[in-house]
Image (cartoon, coloured by chain):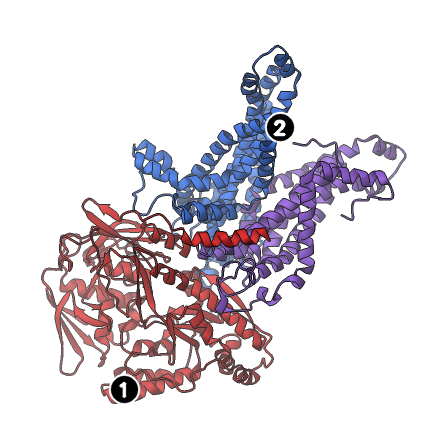
Amino acid sequence: MSGIALRTRSPRRLRFLVWIFARNPSTLLGLLLVAAFLVLAAFGWLIVPDPRDATGAMHLASKLLPPSASHWFGTDEMGDDIFTRVVMGTRTSLWVGLTITVIAALVGTPLGVAAGYFGGRTRAVIMRITDVFLCVPGLVLALAIVAALGPGILHGVVALAIVWWPGYVRLIEAKALTLRAEPFVEAARTMGASDARILATHILPNCVSPLVIKASMDMGLAILAAASLGFIGLGAKPPAPEWGAMIATARSYMPEYWWYSFFPGLFIFLTVLGFNLFGDGLRDILDPRSARG
Amino acid sequence: MLGVLSRRLGLTLGMLFGLVVITFLITNVAPADPAALAAGPDATPDMVATIRHEYGLDKPLPIQFLRYVGDLARGRLGHSVVTGHAVTTDLARFLPASLELVLLAMVFAVVVGVPVGMAAAVRRNRAFDHLVRILAVSGMALPEFWVGLLLLLVFSGWLGWLPTGGQLSVATAPPAPITGMVLLDALLEGRFAVFAEALRHAILPAFVLSLPALAAVVRVNRAEMIEVLQSDYVTAARAHGVAPSRIVGVLALKNAMLPTLAMIGLRFGWMLGSTVLVETVFDWPGIGLYAVDSAVAGDFKPVMGATLAIGVLFMLANLLVDIAYGWLDPRVRTASS
Amino acid sequence: MRRRDLLLTGSAAMIGLRPRPAAAFVREGDRKTLVFSGNQPVPVLDPHVKYDYSTRMMQQSIYDALAKYVDNPARVIPWLAKNWETSADGLTWTFHLVETAKFHNGDPVDAEAVRYSFERGLKLNKGVAWMLKDDLDPSGIVAVDAHTVRMQLRRVFPGFLSFVPWWFIVNPKQVTAHQANDDYGQQWLAVNEAGSGPFSIRRWDPQAVMDLAAVADYWKGWPEGEQKRPGGVIYRVIREPAPRKAALQRGEVDMVTDMTPQDYDQLAKTAGIKVSSNPGMTPFTIMLNTQHGPTSDVNFRKALAYATDYNAFLQIENGAARLLDSPIPAGMFGHIAVPDMPRQDVAKALEYLAKTQWPKGGVTLEYAYVAGLEVERQIGLAMLNALQKLDITVNVTAVPWPTLVARGLKAETAPAMIAVYVTPVSTDPDVVASQYTSSAAGSYWGMHHLQDPELDKMVAAARIEPDQAKRKTQYAAIQDRIVADQPAIFGMVEDRRWAMRDYVQGFDFCPVRLTGEVDFYPMWIAAS
């Protein structure tokens, strides 16, 4: 969000924003969901009944209770409040999604810029390597990497970052390629500007918008991928309140104690949906020329 | 045409090589002790040392790589500790079951997605369209394993209409494995009761698997349909009083078919990857469940075998779509001008 | 807030919904097939190589032994041996075989088959070998004639007969025909059979479905009569408890094990299903690695034992369990309630911890349990919770059974805490006491790797003590000593439960059968 230089001193900009959100209620929904997610991640521990339920507290006398006034999402098999665990899990999801996206972007963007701007053999080598990483579905590759490294949420994050960076290379390479052909870049080169200067002043700043759009959408997808690994059993160790791992445990309690698998999954869905819609909306704001479906 | 074909083929072979390199790196560089990983979870320290020497894991990497490639070329993918069989045997057994699901999912995505997308375009910006668009967006965001569990909860747990998992019920003797796909084999053997039962077991997992593709197909068809409806040709036809449904039925379908099929072809690989989740939920004995069970048990060779198999199929599918698109595209372009 | 109300009404409505009525049991022509489901596969069937509950369940169905365990309390009845006698000095056992027994391929079960099987078991030195290898040598087994076998023990061993039912008899002709370089036919016998038991293999997929056909002309006949006997038995592996339960409710399987306590409680109230609940004799313990890591210090182990919340064990089991007051389960000969049996006492735990290298805790211990067993997982979380008070972190990991055993067999790789049920294979207290001797290291009941030479001597002496009163005192001392060594956190004995459709008949609970193991031979399905 800090990458978007929106100077609201211009009333036109503000009206534009309002118009975007009014025209596209789904973008507004996305914004609200993302905001709610961030608020819960930051301040969730303040609103939950007892944060210790997320770190291994036990209340066996009140296990597997259905949703009620005192336990909005019911309790799990150790008696922990599921609402607490789901909300505290927001924090885990946030750092997981952020780490994966940031690492992928940090690795992929320079490579993409190099490939798009310098072209030639550099481009060929980088793109071929990138293509190779894209020749296996991401989840399968991540599974293989985690299988080699061992289970655990850290290894899952590393594996998913490895799976994710090629996407950034491709995106940024395409953008850098188009930018290189732009007249102002040509002009800068004929005036003798060094490559470094051109990259810094012309190429990189213009890559920011597509980068931010992709990163926003990727946050949700990365969280989903991490939860998927958790569901398989290769994610966080108990009693960590990771959404995917919670659903994995909840399977043993289906169908009687359905709330146990319902609510964590609902949160995953809303989080991913939020980031998807928000990313779409960002695209409208930052890059309205791109074709919409 | 031939030039394009050979170039694509060359690219694919290059990527195949790259895949082999990646799997090699994961196997031999990533873990702390590749020998322990190769020896498997049941190995004693002596066995690990023997493996280290036998597999040449104490030799420099390039030599190890050559050995690795040699093994792959001879179809030696190792042994699975969990099943006790050779990985290649297991793959041959489990892959058809996954393909079965993926094919069903693809069929479903097309058969349902195309009409729904078109209907949404016709009723553009009305209630139905909004609903469809919400579902299309949700389709990408829904965790497949969660949807699978919820569907099981409703259709199996509460309503009891569909089974809880597996490919066939416990005591049904499976049909002779001609293709390895139970549905097909049951038909080939003429055992329709078994076919029906297998279908009942396959409905939910295939549906869940199809969701992202369904969402994509709906989007594409809706977009194509909107374009067609707005085109000059259609406006002119309307002005002449030609029935709109005929326009819809013929022209839009023709235009949308190609991108739809291309999308589905590309989705094939992703769906194969999603079997890792869907097969776990539904206990479907396919390559995804095989990979997961092995990964969780710390049994490494099957995971690599499955990764290679899925990767190869993924690349093949992409290659075929590329070729098909190149072949068909010029004709469509001239047809719709 | 409307969403919450909706959920509440939804939950209420849900309770009224029941799954559709069950489908009928499987039919095999006119006969019914009993379908059983558990979570453990049977990768190796060979009766002289390994045993665990699922494996032995299959072995007991496919093979016969000289004698057999039935009933509760367990007793030994003649089987392949119609009777036996001991010599006056107690060193020689003579078994007289029935004349009618034959293997599935038609060969008669003769003395040579018995001799070969015992020799094979001893020579392979795996699985059941530990039971007899110290007291019986292959050269001491003689086939006197076609139906008489004489076994000469090295020394007097009163418990000898209690182990005989677990030594199954294989057909030497079939095994040697499939031998591959001196392996005693192990490769072949892992997935094939050479037995004489009431069932034979029809379809064998060790990870998923094991389909056994009833042997129509089984030499011992069928207890429920030829009319009612089943056409076969199917053991279906379903690894997750939820689908296994659903399969039972829908009638896709007839009997299940490995369910959670909640499941059993709920199934007991379900129409058409009955739950057999039996006080068990299987101790659940958390074995502690006595050779490596912080747990190698006995004070540290004591600290863990006093920090444990034993009450949580009972709550997790929903009350269907009893805390152990001794390493030897109540009901066994020589059992005493050990004084100073650790119970939760955090102050005492901290006292013991202060005597170790880690008076303030600050270590991480691994708690490994069998993947798929929900109770063990919850107990791990309970340990995690309890040990927080000692500032000890617990890493709860799920490990598939074969991997867990492989790791646990070596002291260097064994986890600090391993959750295991170890069923005593006979009613003699020696089977439990010897689990804590140094000879146990290398088997799944010895993953604590306790090395106490004094205890070894005590157990060896008590094993062969003929005077019952003296033996009792010896075992009392042994129990005290084991608790003092604290090689494990002694947890509880849970009720052994199986859930089955109410048309399943003939189930015979025998406490020396391993956790989920049932004997299929006397079972049948009542006509509806």
Q: Is residue B280 left or right of residue C523?
A: right
> Which chain does red denote in the image?
C
Identity, as a three-letter code, of the amino acid under mark 1: Arg
Q: Position of residue B295 (x, y in %)?
A: 49, 53
Closer to the observer: label 2 or label 1?
2
Q: Decide which of C386, C465 is in the foreground and name it.
A: C386
Q: Chain of mark 2?
A: B
> Which chain does blue denote in the image?
B
Q: Is residue C330 left or right of residue A251?
A: left
Q: Quadrant of the C terminus of chain B?
A: top right
Question: Dot 1: within a 10 Å radius of its alpha carbon, few (fewer than 14), some, or many (20 or more) residues?
Answer: some
Circle number at residue B124:
2
Q: Position of residue B95 (x, y in %)?
A: 43, 41
> Which chain does purple denote in the image?
A
Q: Chain of mark 1?
A: C
Secondary element type, mark 2? loop
Q: Is C519 located above or below residue B210 in the figure? A: below
Q: Is residue C321 left or right of residue A245?
A: left
Residue C518 seen anywhere in this rendered image of the structure: yes
Q: Decide which of C79, B123 is in the foreground and name it.
A: B123
Question: Dot 2: within a 10 Å radius of its alpha carbon, few (fewer than 14), some, or many (20 or more) residues?
Answer: some
Q: Is the residue at mark 2 from the same chain as the one at mark 1?
A: no
Identity, as a three-letter code, of the amino acid under mark 2: Arg
Circle number at residue C471:
1
